[in-house]
Structure formats: structure tokens, C-alpha cells
Amino acid sequence: MNITEQNITIEKVKQSKINQVDFDNLSFGSVFTDHMLVCDYKDGAWEAPKVVPYQPITLDPSSKIFHYGQSIFEGMKAYKDKEDTIWLFRPLENQKRLNISAKRMAIPEIPEEYFMEGLKTLLKVDKEWIPQNEGSSLYIRPFIFASGEGFHASPANEYKFIIACAPSGAYFSGKVKVLIEEKYSRSANGGVGYAKAGGNYAGQFYPTQLAVDRGYNQVIWTDDNTHEYIEEAGAMNIFVRINDTLITGPTSDRILDGITRKSILEIAKDEGIKAEVRKITVSEVVAAAKDGSLKEMFGAGTAAVISPIAGFGFRNTDYDLPEIEDSIAERLKKRITDIQYNRAEDTFGWRYKV
Ligand SMILES: *Cc1c(COP(=O)(O)O)cnc(C)c1O
């Protein structure tokens, strides 16, 4: 089916709940807009997407999502500039990645126009919900899960693609303390770490809770085989700065190909910041922390853009990072958010007008 904004049906809410929302005190991802996009997969094809009132979903207890975890998602944001224009940031990257995740989880891929036309239609219907205050944005959560029924351990024959949105305030985590994890793994070679598959995050909760119990905010994942290489920071990509060089690990089966990570690498190149994509050993980071050449560490992802790390724990020793004046993290964050909010020229062509 050929999908355009014209053949997406819209059923509006009778009464908007927007007046009940305090836009000056938004937390992250806990208030939802009036509408959502729903698209069903049946009889081997995606049906036309529909915009409907945000509402609960009824599922059969045997739906495969509950038993076999066929579930994937994306995370993106919409921004509103001073002229009320709505912008997305590299949305086709999210659409492509959703399909990379879909393929790995034996979920049918969603065609580009279903995703993009559906998203644009939803954003136009809920445009009043896109916050305009400094640092706020509309967090967008596209996801697909197996709604098809039966206890047989095989891919479902029915799926739902939904886009739900949550107006969210400036995401400020403060400086986080992280623990380098050597026992548990987030992902493995041949596994699903490169997919945004729901179960990846479920598997992180317990080790993260153990780290939180020890006074850390987050876990630094190392490779499952040797635990010698630093791979990701929680559900974010990780960067370390040793002297004046930024380093991040290469994407792989185990490391998710983050759009923020990719954008940071391009900005670094543009600004003449030295950046290397190579494996990072735990031992070099510890040695750099000891001799003072470790200047910065930060996580990179859509929600926080950049989340600075204040220090890390490794084998019962804590290492603090120095307080620095002109951090590369701050500089990169400003450059990215200025593009996202249409405050600066976008020489990369990343901004997408809705
Ligand atoms: C989503 C995600 C990231 C960040 O990706 P962005 O596209 O930058 O938001 C990094 N690591 C993991 C494990 C993720 O799930």
C-alpha cells in the first residue's frame, strides 16, 4: 500500500488533557500526548497506520510478546523553535535502525513511508504538546511487538507498530558515577546487542541495581569475552578523552550504532577535535586516570545527548575525573542541540522539518 499523509485516518480525542500538564515541571517520559499512531501487521502485510486517542491495548494472554519477547523500539525527539516550526533530528536513521532491529528479532520490517508519514501526521495532530521551553522536547517512542497468539516458540504472525510521545523536560542527570562491570554482560558476539530489543534492557536492570546498591549510578559494560574492553555506558555509547583525543569503541554485534555517537564523530572531525574509533581497554583508562591524562568520560544518547561521568569504580577502587573548564562534552552538546533546536546553521543536513 502506498502511504501518504492523506490516507492516514485520524480519530481525535473528544477532550484534550493538555491543560492538566505542567510544562514547566516535566520529568522524562511519564506524561503522554493525546494521540498515538497504531499500525497493525496481519496476513503478511502492514495495514494503513491510524492516529487514534492514546489508550491502553488489549492483548491475548498467549501473545508472543509476553512469552518470547519479540519487541523492539526506537528513541527520538521532536523540537519546536521560536517560530513554532517542528524539527526532527536524523529521523531516517531511526527508521533504518528500527528495521535492523526488526530483522534480527524476526519481526517484519516497517516501510519507510509508514514510519515517516505516520510520524509526521501524529506530530501535526499533537503539535501543541511539543514543548518550547529551553531544553524541553517531545520524546518519541516508536515500537513494534508481537501481538500474534500461541504458545508455540516461533515468530508471531501478527504485530503492532505504535508511536507514542511524551513531552519531556531538559534531561539533566547531573554528573554520574559509574562502575566498570566484569561479571555480567549486556551483549555477546552473535547476540542482539546491536538491536534495540526490549530484552536487552531487562537484562541490564539486575546488574545495574547491584551497582546502584554499591553507590554507583550506572554500569560500564565491558566485552563479554575478556571484560578487558570498555563498550557502553548503561544504554548509551561511551566516549573517553585521554589528553586531547576522544575515543569511542567501534560498533559491532555488541555495541549499538548510536545516532548521537555518529553525530559526535562527525562534529569532532568538523571542529578539528582529535577522535579515534578503536577498542578502549579498561587498563588504559585506569592508567590514564592514575597519571592524570584521563580528562573526560561521557555517555552519548538521544535522551540526555551527553551525560558526563564524574568518576568510575573498578575492582574496589574509585577514580575521580578532574573538574575541567572547557569540556569537550559541553562543546559537543551545545553544537548538537543548537542544530536540533534550529539555533544554528546545520551544515550536515541533519535537521528535518516536519
Ligand atoms: C539507544 C541506545 C544508544 C544511543 O543511541 P542514540 O541513537 O544516540 O539514541 C546507545 N546504546 C544503547 C545500548 C542504546 O540502546
Image: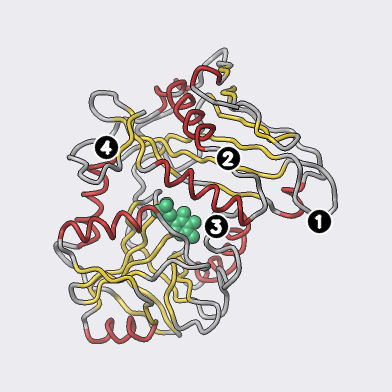
In which of the image's four quarters is ligand 1 placed?
Answer: bottom left
Q: Is residue 161 above or below residue 130?
A: below
Which mark identifies residue 195? Answer: 3
Give 182 or 64, whichever is nearer the viewer.
64
Crowdedness near tag 3: few (<14), some (14–19) or many (≥20) residues, C-alpha within 10 Å: many
Q: Residues within 10 Å of mark 1 (few under 14, many from 20)?
A: few
Instruction: Identify residue type, mark 4.
Output: Tyr
Q: Is residue 38 left or right of residue 282?
A: right
Q: Are marks 2 and 1 in contact (CB under 8 Å)?
A: no
Mark 4 sits on what residue?
341
- The residue carrying mark 2 has its beta carbon less than 8 Å from ligand 1: no
Q: Earlier in the sequence, mark 4 or mark 3?
A: 3
Give amino acid for label 1.
Ala
| Rendered-image quadrant of the C terminus | top left
Q: Secondary structure at mark 3?
A: loop
Which residue in the structure is indicated by mark 1?
Answer: 153
Instruction: Indicate the quadrant where residue 124 lies.
Output: top left
Q: CA distance from mark 1 to mark 3?
A: 20 Å
